[in-house]
Each structure stands twice: as C-alpha cells, then as structure tokens.
Amino acid sequence: MIKRRKTSVVKVDSVRIGSPRPIVIQSMTKVATTDVARCIKQAGRLASAGAGLVRIAVATKADSRAFAKIVEKSPVPLIADIHFSAARAIEAIEAGAAKIRLNPGNIKKRADILRIIASAKACGTAVRIGVNEASIRDLKKADVPAGRRVGLMLREMTKYVRLFAKAGFSNIVLSAKSADVVRTIEINRRIAEKFSYPIHLGLTHAGLPEDAKAASAVAIGALLAEGIGDTIRVSVAGDPMQEVLIAKEILQSLGLYKLNEPELIVCPTCGRCQVDVVKLARQVKRVLKDVKKPVRVAVMGCIVNGPGEAVDADVAVCAAKGKGVIYRHGRKRTTVPENKLIKALVNELEKC
Amino acid sequence: MIKRRKTSVVKVDSVRIGSPRPIVIQSMTKVATTDVARCIKQAGRLASAGAGLVRIAVATKADSRAFAKIVEKSPVPLIADIHFSAARAIEAIEAGAAKIRLNPGNIKKRADILRIIASAKACGTAVRIGVNEASIRDLKKADVPAGRRVGLMLREMTKYVRLFAKAGFSNIVLSAKSADVVRTIEINRRIAEKFSYPIHLGLTHAGLPEDAKAASAVAIGALLAEGIGDTIRVSVAGDPMQEVLIAKEILQSLGLYKLNEPELIVCPTCGRCQVDVVKLARQVKRVLKDVKKPVRVAVMGCIVNGPGEAVDADVAVCAAKGKGVIYRHGRKRTTVPENKLIKALVNELEKC
C-alpha cells in the first residue's frame, strides 16, 4: 500500500537497488577486516538472517588484500566502505567489490574521484555516495545552526552527484546520514525531491541495541512511509545480527518485507480484562516458533475489539474468564475451556 | 524543527491537547478498575514516569463507582474509556472524568450521543472520538479489501464529528486506530487533512514489549515527523510503564520531548575499530545514570566520524588503541590512557 518514489535501478552484482525492486537490507561486518575467515563467517550469518548486501571497512593496504580474499568466498555481494583513500577504493573495485561506499567529506580531490569513477565503470561496480553530516568540513564547527546543516549536506551531495553525472556514471545510490532523527528525515526528503537515484537510509550511531531501536524505527520508518528509501541499514553498537533483525521489523511493520513466519498481535489489556493475556500471549508465542507460515495471529482479552480484530487476523483467540473463542479468518470456529486454548489454536493454524 | 499541524486546543482539566502545546503522553491502568487503591497507585506511577493523562476502563456500574473514588485521589487527570454504554459515559462525566473516550463503533444511537454531549458540555469534560477499525460494523467482514478500510474509517469519523459540531461541542480530540501500521498512517493523514481538531495517535494491539516497539515507533513516529499528532499512547501487552518509556523514546528521538537526562549515541563499530566500543559505552552508560542533565554524549571508536560527531555532542569520547580523546562542545580537551577515560569524561560532564 506504500507508494514508493520512482528511482533508477542500480545493479550491485546480482542484487538490484531501486523501486520497484524490494528494499534491500544491509549490515556491516564488525570483526577486523584482516581476519578473513571471521569476516566470511559473519557475512554469511548476516546473509542468512536477511541481509542482501554486506559492507566491509577497507581502510589499510592489508584490508585491501584481505577484502580480495573475502570477496572470493563470500556468499553475499560485498560493499567496500572507503574513507580518505582513493587507492583503497580502486583496490576494492579491482578485488571485485559489488559496490563501494564513498564519503564525499573524506575524498575531495576531483582527480581522485575521477580515477575511482573510471575504475568502477571499467569493472561494473556500483557506488554509494554517502554523505555523513559529521564528515563535512563546514559542519565540524560547533556553531553551525541546526537549520543550516541540512542545506550544507545537500550542497555537498549535489556537488558530488554532478561530478559523477559529468563523468557519465549513473550506477549510484545516495545516502545522507546524521545522528539526529529530524535532520535525517529532512535531508532525505530533500534528496528524494532533487534526484531520482535510489536512496540508502540509515541513522548514524544510533546507540546500544536497547536505545537504537526506537530512534532507528522512527527515522527509517518515517521516510519509508513517505515512499523514500530503497536500501536500509540499521546501526547498532554490538552484534550486527541485531541490525538485520531490527531492519526486518521496520520493513515488516510497513508491509515491505514478507517474513515466512507468524506475526503476533496482542491486546494491551486494561481494567476490563479478566484473564492473564500476557501469559497466554507468551504461550502462543512459544507455539508459533515452530510455525513457518506468514500468518497473523491475534491474542485478545476482551469483547471490545476481540471479535473485530479477529477479522484482520488469520487466527485469533479471544480469551474470557476460564474459556476462549477461536476464530479463523474472522469466523468463529470453537469455544473451548482455558486449558484447551493452545491446542485449539494450533489446530486452526494447521488449516491456514 | 518539526512543524506541527495547526489544531484547536482542547482543555482536559489542567492539561491542554493541541499544537503548539507539548505532545501529551498517555497510558492506561491495567488492574481491575474496581481495585481503587491499585488504580490510584498505578496512575501515580505512570504520571511520575511522564504520562500527562491516564485512561481507565469504565465498563460496569461497579467500575463507575470505583472511577468516582479514583478521580478524587488521582494525582493526574483521568480519562474514562467507554464502550457500548451511554450510561457509563454519563456516570464517568458526572464523577469528574477530565475526558471520556467514545468509540463510534460501539455507541451508535443518536439520542445516546446527544445525551452524552449535553452532559460533557455541562461538566466541561473533553471527549475523544476514538474510531477503532475493529469496531466498525462494516469492517467486521473479512472480505473488505485493505484499500477500502481507510475510507470506511474516515466515513465513520466524519459522521460522528458532524454530530458533535451540530450539537455545538468542539472540545474534542480525534483518533483512528488499526493494528496495521500503513493504515494507521494513512487514516491519520486523511483525518489531519479534513479536520483541525487535535489528534490522538496509537497503534492498536502492537504486541508484547519486544515486538511492539519498532512497529509503534514507525507508525507514531512517521505521523509525528509529518507534524501530525498531539497526544500519543503506545500499546504494549504488559506493564504500562513500558508504554510511557517507549512513548518518551519516540518523542525524544524527534526532539519533541526534553528529558532531563543524558542521551547516549554510540558508533556501531566496523572492521576499522580497534577498541571494545560496546564495553566502553556500557561503562559510560552506567556513569550517566547519575547525571541529571539533558546532555548528548557520544562514544566513538574511530577517526572517520569521531571528531565530526564530537561537534554535535556535548561531550564525546573518541577511543583509539589504548587511549582516548575527550571533546567538549566539539573542542578537543584532553588525551588520556584507556583506564582514565571514564574519569576524564565525568570531569568534562561536570563542566557542561
């Protein structure tokens, strides 16, 4: 139901970024790039969890050599994360990076950029132009007011995009990241308005897992809800698997990712509630772990929304004192005593 | 920086709902309404945590009697949650509810609604017109396509609003809730376009705490980012304190809520990282627990964004192998060995 913004489609090895192609989840390896075996293993885990692309930092000459080995064995197309060094960019491209990420704040020389573009063109490599608010020279002053920051980021992006266009290179994805949610939303709206390249969304340095989820969901979710965003990366300090799982949650909430597993909705309960809905929901959740179907299951504790909500769920349990009613596709199927609810639910799930 | 939609301002006892007044956090008590002492205690806890209004289900005659007693001792203005019964609505208003919530799907008779309006007018009580997708009769059929559901919800809302307008009652807040994030966003955009009354945002039945956060942040956050929403309630199956904490996180991420406590941003780390940033961040987080200032603290693990990010933070630590640099308001203050980082950070925090 979300109408995505029209974009060009960028080829990243076997993956495509841009509407109407599915939104691609990305993450990054967090072990030393020179540790080839662990990098390959981590990239594999991220890919199995749902990452369509995995990014790896390539900062030193030794990283470049390691990256070349990782590319050979990676089960998923890789992106080289480049800062400061044109040499690293070209080494990564020649090593077989599916895409490289350049930060305009860190590679500024026109001649360097043109050399990178020539190399990417020759090898069919995609490029992300990844503006970071924190890397823009003019923004490294504490006294730049918040209101001007978005304008300066857009100016930086525009200069870079023009240079790529002039060099006849269009296989690009754009991103502009900030640690501030409001500025992240605003700069991406402006980029979406001005350019038709696909957009990579992310909130920089969101924080520890427990702190990062809400802010990332707001920033990335708000933009996706406006149709903006073709690939996303959730930043979390810690295990990158968390990044993929949160990214999936955000996309799934907007119907942009179909998990082959159940979705559980639960009524929040209130003073009307006469049963322990949370306990029942936990029991249902345990049962659902073994179900590999994209079904929506509702656990409700009262008559206000129960029967109505049941319509929107594939299977619903409306619990009352000592008993419960089971619905399938909005139709009442059976009323059973409390201790038989789970069995009856499983029975209906099997028919879905 | 978010430009809020212009609305009327609704008086709810000492609280005001509507722009430019601060967005009000709501939650609900989840103990039996007849348990007066526990209700008062829970309402008090929710208020201390940041809820500006607390809602209580009033479903039975006994609930009405209990509600009257709770109102007398509540430290926070109370909203009575009404479904089905006009008698309960009037009893709650007469008992001193600051606001009542009516569900048009459940009180349909024109004469009943007019009686409630007359009573609310006489007592200066505010009313929320709270449409629930699951309570609309026409939507209780499984075969209503998703695309039509938003239109039917808006029609239900419009009918009700017109009736209130005709009766000369304008102290109303509007809400339309669904368990579906995309429909929640869409119906609220439509309501915001059509009416100028304040809007209450929420996602119905989001789920267990670990499942509810991302979806609620996406739905509520996306609307807030578009300037829509004057009061919010996060639904979580479980302790309502969770609802208030998540609501605060969502608002804070958009700069719509000023906590008098630190915000911690942490770099997600990558293959460039040579220090245990997560461990350092956890240490910093422990120290910050005792700090009661609205400061932004950044913990960074590399040179790419560290110094730039430091500009946007009140205090920042950029950790490198065996040592770290401390910044305050973007200015490098000191370089200290790893084991003195926390002490140096605390020292700078004191000067903020």
Image: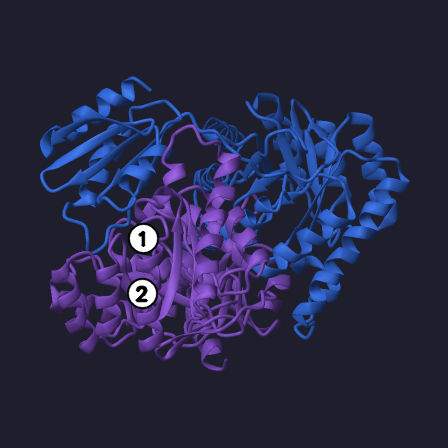
Chain colours: A purple, B blue
Q: Position of residue A18 (x, y in %)?
A: 49, 70
**Place of residue B339 in the rendered image (x, y in percent of width and height, measured from the top left):** 10, 31
Name the residue furthest front.
A111
Give the quadrant of residue B33: top right
Distance from the alpha carbon under mark 1 to that under mark 2: 10 Å
| Three-letter code for the amino acid on which mark 2 is drawn | Ile
Chain containing the residue with disc 2: A
* Most foreground residue, A214 or B208: A214
Looking at the image, residue A143 sits to the left or right of residue B309; the answer is: right
Q: Is residue A139 above or below residue A73?
A: above
Tag shown at residue A107: 1
| Left or right, residue A332 beside residue A79 | right
* Same chain shared by disc 1 and disc 2: yes
- Residue A116 - label: 2
Residue B27 percent location from the top left of the image: 54, 38
| Dot placed on the residue nearer the N-terminal end, 1 or 2 | 1
Q: Residues within 10 Å of mark 2 (few under 14, many from 20)?
A: many
Task: Provide the secondary structure element on which disc 2 rests.
Answer: helix
Instruction: Identify the residue at the far right of this view.
Output: B166
Residue drawn at the location 11% of the way across and 63% of the way down: A35
Name the residue located 55 percent from the left edge and 64 percent from the top edge: A196
Residue B114 versus residue B47 in the image, above or below = below
